[in-house]
Structure formats: structure tokens, C-alpha cells
Amino acid sequence: MPHLILSNPSTNACDYEVYLSNPFNTTYYKGLRITSTNYGSSTSTVSSYVVSVLAQSSSSQYVRGKVTSGMSAGRTYTLYAYAQAQNGTWYLAGSDTITTLNANYAMYPCKVMSISADYNDDYTHLDHSKGYPDGIYDWPWDDNCGDTGRSYIYCPCDEMEVKRVYGVGDTSKTNTIWLRSTTQVKLANGSTDYLVMMVIHPNDDTLQNISVGDRFTRGQAMFKEGKEGISLGYHFHISLGLGSIEGTGWRNVPDTPYYVIYTTNDPIKPENALYINSNFTTVIDKKGLNFKYMSF
């Protein structure tokens, strides 16, 4: 029985296998096309298609290859295979449905974006971002999630692993946690790398049950905002870096009490790393930062 089988999806492609009633050669066929349009069981034309193959000198009834156009990440497609007989008529050989993989996009980690201070804020953040001759800097921002309570921060990519937890149970230290993506992520600036996220100020009660090696998946609540250390209220102080954690994961900004993220690759600005997922985050205040939007 003729059929079409779609398999091995990626973010924008998949494999196909078509089995025909006769060998795929010029004795029986002129060609084969795969299309997203259902033209019925037979048609005089297949004008829109994503694959087109001319009949070969073959004794096999199978035609195999890859669909490499017309697909995007995280979508479901039904495709139809039509074989053109020598009389010019296109006959339906089969249909199948497949869902492409989601790209591992990095998304904003809060359900409500309400940035209270960006990396240009002159209260403390400029001491992080203005840079020093020895390259000690990062691009931190504070988000209070639009309320005075304690909202969660969520995993911003397919999976993150806890790499370090600092300060829990010791009032002389400011609670801090580091997480790293377990695979490379697609960043908003178009590049791909491992993403490291350092978050400062969560309270003991939300970090005490988190351990190094714990993993979270996209959109999973991780821990609540807090006000440990130097803080005027509940919020997340977030910094991002690329690659892997270097040393202890942070280093001191000279002549200040502040620490910046330390990774094998450069720190990265939030708008260059994170998309705003319109299906996940509501924006109240982005402090003029030019984030890109995406729905996924």
C-alpha cells in the first residue's frame, strides 16, 4: 500500500519516506512532490510544494529524502505526497503529520516584567556595568515582578542546572544562586551559547531546599524573590553570562562592595540574551531596554 512517513524532526526540517505502487522510474512515473496542500486523490497539477523529485532509473518503490523548506520550530504540519504518472496526472501516495522541535530559545524568566533598575541605574548598577580596565563588569537588572510580594522566577530555557548556592543560613552573606543551561540556547542577538544566570537576594526559605545538581525545565517555578543583603524590598537582582561558571562564579568590582558574574565567556545584556515570550510574560516596565518579542 502506498504511503508517506515523516520522521526525525528538527526545528525546521524532517525526513520523509514515500512508498509507491511501482518502482520510481520513468517507466511508471515522471516525478514526485510533497506538499502541504491536499489536492485530493488525484489532480492535474501540484503547483505548491516543499519537495520535488524527478523519476530516476530505479528498481525501488521507495523514495527517501529530507524536507528542508516551509517548516519552522514548534509547529505541526500535515504533508501530502503526490506521484505523477506518465499520463501527467498526480496521484496521492499518502499523507502524514509531524511536529517540529522547539528551538531552545532563552526567554524572560518572570511572568510579569517590571524592571525597577536596569544596568544603567546610577544607584548601584553603574558600578557593575561601566567597566574596568581589567574587564570586571556585568549587566545586572532588578525586577520586582510588579508587586510588593514574592513572585517566582522561572526556568528561561529547556533545562537549567543549579551550579552553586551561596549564603543560605549565614546572615553575614547575601544569598545568591547560579544556574547554567544544560544545552546551548538560542539568544536574542542571534548567537548560540550556554547561558549562566546569577540571581541575588532570594530568602533562605526559598533556597534552603535547592541543591547543586537540581534541574528545572522551561517555565518551571524555581524560587521566589527576596530581600537578603542590600535590598530596599523584594526583587530579583539578575546577571547573565555565557559559557561556564569561572571560579566561584563571581568577582569583586574594584573599590566597591559589589560582585559581578564571572563566566568563561562574556557577560551579556538581558535584551541581547532573552526574548520576551508573549505567551508567558506580561510587560509592565522594561526601562527602555529593546527586548525582542516572540511567541513560543
Image (cartoon, rainbow, N blue to C red):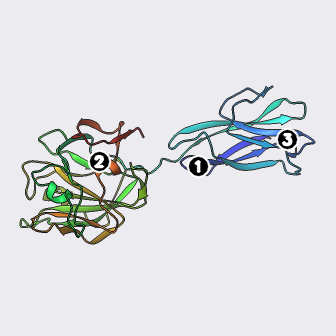
Q: Residue at x 6, y 49 (%)?
A: 232
Q: Are marks 1 and 2 in contact (CB under 8 Å)?
A: no
Q: CA distance from mark 1 to mark 2?
A: 27 Å
> Is residue 202 visible in this depiction of the protein?
no
> Mark 2: which secondary structure?
loop
User: Which residue position holds label 1?
Assistant: 9
The residue at the far bottom in this view is 247
Q: Residue at x 83, y 47 (%)?
A: 61
Q: CA distance from mark 3 to mark 1?
A: 26 Å
Classify 176 as above or below 286.
below
Q: Which mark is residue 21?
A: 3
What number of labels is visible? 3
> Mark 3: which secondary structure?
loop
Q: Amino acid at mark 3?
A: Ser
> Mark 1: which secondary structure?
loop
Instruction: In this rendered view, identify the residue nearer to me: 34 or 222.
Output: 34
Q: Amino acid at mark 2?
A: Pro
Task: Please tell me which of labels 2 and 3 falls first in the chain.
Answer: 3
Task: Please tell me which of labels 3 and 1 falls first in the chain.
Answer: 1
